[in-house]
Amino acid sequence: MLVSYNWLQDFLKLNQDPNKLADEITRTGIEIASVNHPEKGLKKIVVGHILDCKKVEGTHLNLTHVDVGENDPIQIVCGAPNVAAGQNVIVALHGARIAGNVKIKKSKLRGMQSNGMICALQEIGFADGIVPEKYVDGIYVFPEDADIKPGQDVYQALGMDDYILDFDITPNRADTLSMEGAAYEVGAIVDEKVNVEDVTLKEDGPDWTKQINPVVDPKLAPKYYLRKVTGVKIADSPLWMQRRLWNAGIRPINNVVDVTNYIMLLTGQPMHAYDAKTFANGKLVVRKANKGEKLTLLNDKLVDLDPNDIIITDGDKPVMMAGVMGGLNSEITSDTTDVILESAIFDPTLIRKAALRHANRTEASSRYEKGVNWDNTEKAINMAALLLRNDASATVDAGIIKATDQQRKPVVVHTTVSYINKVLGSEISSEEMLNIFKRLNFPTEIDGNKLTVHVPNRRWDISIPADLVEEVGRLYGYDNLKSTAPVLPETHGGYSVKETMIRRIKRIVQGQGMMEAISYSLTSPEKAVRYTKDPKDLVKVQWPLNSSRSTMRQNLMTGLVDAASYNMARKQKELAFYEQGRVYDHDGGTFNEHEHLATLYSGTTYAENWQHLNQKVDFYFVKGQLSNLLTAIGINDDEVEYKPEAIAGMHPTRTAGIYINDQYVGMIGMVAHAVTMKDKALRGAKLYGYELNLDTIIPMLNKKTVAKEAPKFPAIERDLSILVDKDVDNQEIENVIRANAGKYLVNLKVIDVYQGVHVDANKKSLAYNLTFLNEKDTLTDKVVNKAMDNITSYLEKDINAKIR
């Protein structure tokens, strides 16, 4: 809300510097984003009266002589299409400074001396969006009844001598989206009485209330008032009103539309004016739109109405999208003579959704969605009628139609002085508190320690004692509160067992060289269940930003794949990502959250350099990384089993489910070609990774890892090469080896796998490295040889292996 300092002075006695006042307001809870003084930086810009204007043949230029209050008129060459003799205009004299710190000098155009510049509003700092439409492409011409004279500075006449305070409000303080609300707020801060006048309206036309029979759904519009004015003469608004509108960021249009916008700025109550011919059939219906109905808005935008849009109709066709914008078919035009004024309260949720749905958020909709003062509905419509009588020669017909008229009773909040002091940690006396509520214009009764506060409807954000605590605290001054430690039971900080485990797992993964990624929790319905073994019911957002962010994820892998796509599109091929976060589902009719960990690898296992072979990341490398992680957190290899799984989005033959003690905890494998081929950046890439359900794994973990010293005695390594049937898997072989190797086998790893021309087609060759260690004594070859003999014997016996 742009608040005029000069306008505020209509309500309050203010003598503070506007910038210091802005600081005071900010300290009490409403941030002032900026203080703008439109006159700042401008110099020698005055009112000029054009005495004569002659067209320069063969050009678009005009030669004018302008009275600028000096002894003699000055000659100015002007190219504006709307310049003419007899106009009062804005003139930048020789040596003037206009917008952008541009200096105006005497010059010659086509050999003609020009001693200044006749200005458009934009050239002295006005934004295009607030310049009256007929002056957008030309110079500004003052209204004939403007109280100005040649030679005087233009700043006061145009409202540029004002200070504009930008109230950057939070949604709960929508009461300051009006000058009256802002005045009450500033009055409370500076401790000045606020003067808000009531409206006394004299009706001087015949009763009109039988002319229209409105039908209004009270759920859509709990308050709906109509008034009629006749004999309206459409013209420009008086300059004082135009000043206030453009200083508030609103473009002046005509004396009827401007009145409705002015009343909205003044009271916070949005209004609308219809050409009375719109309802010539005597019908007005407020309802929800029907499917297929359309409406062309005042901004010439044709919208397809939604069944949840509130509309005003003439009993047949829509003429307005309620609370958002009027229709072109009910617009006030130069031919309008009779006007029907509307002041209403509409359902805020439906207004907000309609404005967002149609990408048409307006000053009116922004107020309706945050709330408006129900006490101002009638005052606003009466004040608008009064202004139209004064500024548009209108006759106010007798009677006001109240199609719906629900009342909202002021809130009464009961609290205590001690409660407020306890929460604030202060020692504010009851007299000081009473004074604060008096400054807020909240009638208050005190009975010992008890406070009864009557909150007017203009402050609909206050309803409970905690709200009163905030009001007292901010007006007393947070900087006046003593800095003391709160008197609370002592609590010991720290992480829960689960949080500690998660952080431990993350440290291990980071130690493996992985870089943490953080991706969106929202994705598309398709991606939400991709890379998921058993998809659950989706958690969908009711009002998504777009279709690709409509559903809560059920896996982390999809975010990592998106991150890989982003990096590979920028020529980053060596990737090692991990993410730890939550996934969501709606299984069993309840919303569930689960902690997951996922990794994604691409490229080579080591950075390319002259010392290493360029070994590509593959399934076994990623499996090795996972095995190291599981070992580090206390899960033994013999508890882990990998089983082939068919998982959407993963390669059909290079994917396995991870089972710990026969319980499914995640998956590991390669992202399917079908996924990478659809993405130009990922085309041809091989992405491997795994995803773990930490909620399942963490209960299986030891609470801590105990380190032990390095062994004092040397280990002995032996290699073993065997030939087995090709359908015998590695896990089966390792189980036989470990079961028969004795107690000194400490490490077992595959070092080679071969299938080819040198072995039978139904056979494969595997080579293993075995490490034996006795931590308490020197291990002898005799003991190791005995263990190796035992291993080979059982390999031959149990799986028909041939020792090579």
Image (cartoon, rainbow, N blue to C red):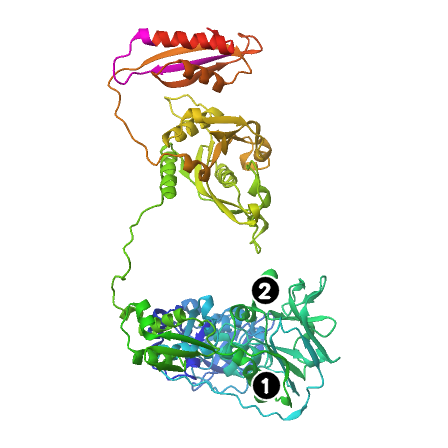
Amino acid type, residue under disc 1 in the picture? Ala
Q: Is residue 775 magenta?
A: yes
| Residue pictured at 28% horizontal, 12% vertical | 779
Q: Quadrant of residue 8?
A: bottom left
Q: Is residue 175 magenta?
A: no
What secondary structure is found at the residue carrying circle 1? helix
Magenta extent: 764-783
Q: Quadrant of residue 447?
A: bottom left
Q: Position of residue 315 (x, y in %)?
A: 73, 74
Amino acid type, residue under disc 2 in the picture? Ala
Q: Is residue 343 above or below residue 604?
A: below
Q: Can residue 561 be seen in this snapshot?
A: yes
Q: Can residue 35 be seen in this snapshot?
A: no
- Nearest to the observer: residue 213 or residue 714: 714
Q: What whole-number distance in Å separates the C-alpha atoms at marks 1 and 2?
A: 28 Å
- Nearest to the observer: residue 69 or residue 576: 576
Residue at which label 1 appears: 385
**Mark earlier in primary sequence (1, 2):** 2
Left or right relative to 185: residue 379 = right
Q: Position of residue 193 (x, y in %)?
A: 38, 84
Q: What number is the disc on residue 355?
A: 2
Q: Position of residue 191 (x, y in %)?
A: 34, 81
